[in-house]
Amino acid sequence: MNERRLRVDPIACAAHGICAELLPELIDLDEWGYPVLTAPVPRRLTAAAARAVAACPALALRLERKPFA
Ligand code: SF4
């Protein structure tokens, strides 16, 4: 089983905040409007995370699959 995590490219991110609106369970915004991603993506939120990735206008958000060590 693989763990999935959201990653943000801090250079590409333009702080639109759309991702946090679409996925408030996993994405907070810092005081400048940049996303703060902490937790792994639970299986039940995988589809919602993929939608947030697709909706990012700056293509700054990705969903990575990492195998357990
Ligand atoms: S939607 Fe994309 S550009 Fe906007 S805050 Fe989220 S990661 Fe950054």
Image (tube, grey):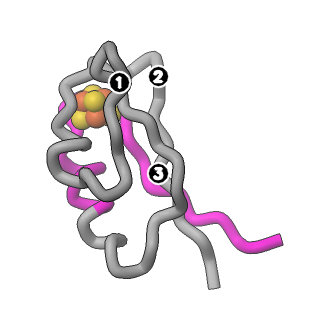
Neighbor class of circle 1 (other Cα within 10 Å; few <14, some 14-19, many 20+) is some
> Residue type at mark 2?
Pro
Cβ atoms at labels 2 and 3 below 8 Å apart: no
Place of residue 68 in the rendered image (x, y in percent of width and height, measured from the top left)? 75, 73
- Circles 1 and 2, Cβ within 8 Å, touching? The answer is yes
Q: Which residue is mark 3?
A: 6
Asked which secondary structure carries label 2, the reply is: loop
> Which quadrant of the view contains residue 26?
bottom left
Find out whether the residues at labels 1 and 3 contact each other: C-beta distance under 8 Å: no
| Left or right: residue 31 compared with residue 20 | right
Look at discs 1 and 2 and give the one toward the viewer. Answer: 1
Marker count (numbered)? 3
* Residue 45 in the image: above or below residue 44: above
The residue drawn where x is 34% and y is 39% is: 28
Asked if residue 15 can be seen in this view, the reply is yes
Q: Quadrant of the image for the C terminus?
A: bottom right
Vertically, is 52 above or below 15?
below
Residue at point 46%, 51% (across, down): 6
Sooner in the amino-acid sequence: mark 1 or mark 3: 3
Instruction: Give the magenta range.
Output: 49-69
Find out whether residue 68 is within the magenta segment: yes
Q: Which residue is mark 1?
A: 34
x and y, in percent, of residue 64 in the image: 53, 57
Residue at the disc numbered 2: 10
